[in-house]
Image (spheres, grey):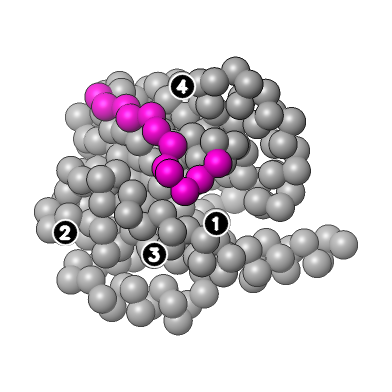
Amino acid sequence: MGWLYDFYERRVFPRLMDLTMRGMNELRGDALAGVHGDVLEIGFGTGLNLRHYPPAVARVTGIDPIEAPPKKVQARIAAVVFPVAIHQLRADGRLPFDAARFDSAAVTWTLCTIPDPIAALREVRRVLKPGASLHFIEHGRSDDPKVARWQDRWNPIQKVIGCGCNVNRRIDEIVESAGFRLEKLDRFVPDHMPRLFGEMYRGVGVSG
């Protein structure tokens, strides 16, 4: 069973997520507005964010624990005017960059899956310049107690079929606990999504 799940996680799931997350493309532009300069993207995936970056972006460095389908990623990289570099996440979770290197960072629908999202964002903050911004959009815990209870019930199943994805994390608390000051936060549910999965947190955090 271990090898079968490993095959699902590394080969099948990335392709399923690429297909599913295309339906979220309309939300990416607003989430990435204000990103600029030398950008670090956590959870690069299949590169769906690339065409939604604003003109002020000079370079994107992507980090992901799983290698995405190479042909699809290369086609998306070739379609943008700025250089793109992709690194696989190290086992210890440490980013292979000097402190205060990046002008801004982006994370989209990724904090739900990272085993220790606070530690991961602290590492992101380390490599951001002082005053740099973290732009995020994530799904997470509902502010409706009834929905939140259903999220708690469903979450053990979600973590298996979603390869570690959690539906009940408080994204705003995670961002603040990592040392970012929340400058902006929007909460909403897209019309086409059930609240169990669709409670969105979109915002901007500023590093110290």
Determine whether label 3 and label 2 are within 8 Å by CB. no
Res. 95 visible in picture: no
Q: Which residue is mark 4?
A: 173
Q: Which residue is mark 3?
A: 47
Q: Quadrant of residue 175?
A: top left
SS category of the residue bearing label 1: loop
Q: Residue at x 35, y 36 (%)?
A: 202
Quarter of the C terminus within the rendering: top left
Q: Residue at x 80, y 67 (%)?
A: 4
Expressed as whole percent of the image width and height from the top left, the position of residue 45 reads 47, 61
Question: Quick check: 154 above or below 141?
Answer: below
Q: Which residue is mark 1?
A: 65
Q: Which residue is mark 2?
A: 58
Say which amino acid is labelled 3.
Answer: Gly
Q: Residue at x 26, y 76 (%)?
A: 79
SS category of the residue bearing label 2: strand
Say which amino acid is labelled 1.
Answer: Pro
Say which amino acid is labelled 2.
Answer: Ala
Left or right: residue 4 compared with residue 192: right
Q: CA distance from mark 1 to mark 4?
A: 24 Å
Q: CA distance from mark 2 to mark 1?
A: 24 Å
